Each structure stands twice: as structure tokens, then as C-alpha cells.
Image: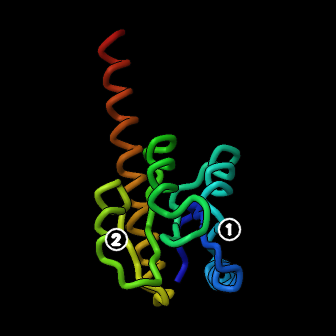
């Protein structure tokens, strides 16, 4: 399954899980990078914006919800999919309330993740198009 060219950042403190997921997504021709903490994710996004972030909920230091808040504050158009290894619906719901696109339970099916990534990217692209159209409309009105 070939995916339109969009970029993804995976954020997970479990090194083996992250490495495996990176390999599996790259085999599907996805432009994907990975970091091991919320702090690293924010630094990465400052240097290299992405379209979709897949974010683990439970991490030492800056946890997933704290990272989600910071991402949405600095990069409101980036879509975020929360990953949780713990059947914790309250955290998933809180993530959605904070602006997450969706969530997945670990271990997840790779195809399900790909579908959610594509849907999140489509939502971001549509949002960007609407902003662009409204800016162009304002500029046309000022001429």
C-alpha cells in the first residue's frame, strides 16, 4: 500500500518498539522519523515540521498529554495520534479533548495505523487548504 508523500514523527521511549515501527513504516515508503521523548519531539518539530505525530502516552519526563499540549500550542495544524499500551480510556479521551486526532492501543495492527495516519494527514491537508483559500479571499478583497 503506497501512501501519499507526507511526513510522520513517532515518539516513544521504548527503543525496540520504536525501531521496529520505523522499519515497518519505511518499508511502506512512508517518510518517518523517530524520537524517544516529548522534549526530543518538540526540538525535532522546531527544526523540521511534520504532518502527523504518533505519540506514546506513557513516557518518563514529559508524558504524552503534556507533549500533546505543547505540540498543539506551537504547531496547531499538526495532527497527533496517541498510542497507549495501557487500556486507559480516560487518558485517550483527555487526549482527544486536547486536540488529538485519534488514539490506538498497543500493540496495534500496522494497517490500522497506516489508515489512521492517512486520515490524519487528509484532515491536516484539508485544514491547510481552507486557511489558504480564506487568506487568498482576503487578499483578493483588498485589491
Does residue 16 sit above or below 30 in this rendering?
below
Q: Are marks 2 and 1 in contact (CB under 8 Å)?
A: no
What is the CA distance from the residue labelled 2 to the residue labelled 1?
20 Å
112 or 139, which lies in front?
A: 112
Residue occupying the point 29% across, 71% down: 90
Q: Earlier in the sequence, mark 2 or mark 1?
A: 1
Residue 26 location in percent, x, y? 67, 78
Residue 62 location in percent, x, y? 57, 58
33 or 62, which lies in front?
A: 62
24 or 4, which lies in front?
A: 24
Residue occupying the point 52% across, 56% down: 67
In terms of secondary structure, where does tag 2 sit? Answer: helix
The C terminus lies in quadrant: top left
Q: Residues within 10 Å of mark 1 (few under 14, many from 20)?
A: some
Residue occupying the point 44% across, 47% down: 72
Residue 79 location in percent, x, y? 44, 57
Q: Which residue is mark 1?
A: 36
Residue 136 location in percent, x, y? 38, 27
111 or 14, which lies in front?
A: 14
Please tell me in which quadrant of the rendered image residue 34 appears.
Answer: bottom right
Q: Residues within 10 Å of mark 2 (few under 14, many from 20)?
A: many
> Is 35 on the left-hand or right-hand side of 8?
right
> Is 136 on the left-hand or right-hand side of 21?
left
> Is 126 on the left-hand or right-hand side of 2?
left
The numbered disc on residue 92 is 2
Amino acid at each position: 500500500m503506497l501512501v501519499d508523500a507526507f511526513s510522520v514523527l513517532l515518539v516513544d521511549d521504548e527503543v525496540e518498539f520504536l525501531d521496529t515501527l520505523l522499519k515497518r513504516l519505511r518499508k511502506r515508503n512512508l517518510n518517518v522519523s523517530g524520537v524517544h521523548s516529548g522534549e526530543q519531539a518538540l526540538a525535532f518539530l522546531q527544526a523540521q515540521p511534520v504532518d502527523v505525530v504518533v505519540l506514546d502516552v506513557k513516557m518518563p519526563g514529559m508524558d504524552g498529554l503534556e507533549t500533546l499540549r505543547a505540540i498543539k500550542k506551537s504547531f496547531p495544524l499538526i495532527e497527533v495520534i496517541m498510542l497507549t499500551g495501557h487500556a486507559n480510556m480516560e487518558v485517550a479521551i483527555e487526549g482527544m479533548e486536547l486536540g488529538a486526532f485519534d488514539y490506538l492501543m498497543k500493540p496495534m495492527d500496522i494497517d490500522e495505523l497506516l489508515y489512521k495516519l492517512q486520515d490524519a494527514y487528509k484532515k491536516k491537508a484539508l485544514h491547510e487548504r481552507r486557511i489558504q483559500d480564506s487568506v487568498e479571499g482576503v487578499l483578493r478583497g483588498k485589491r
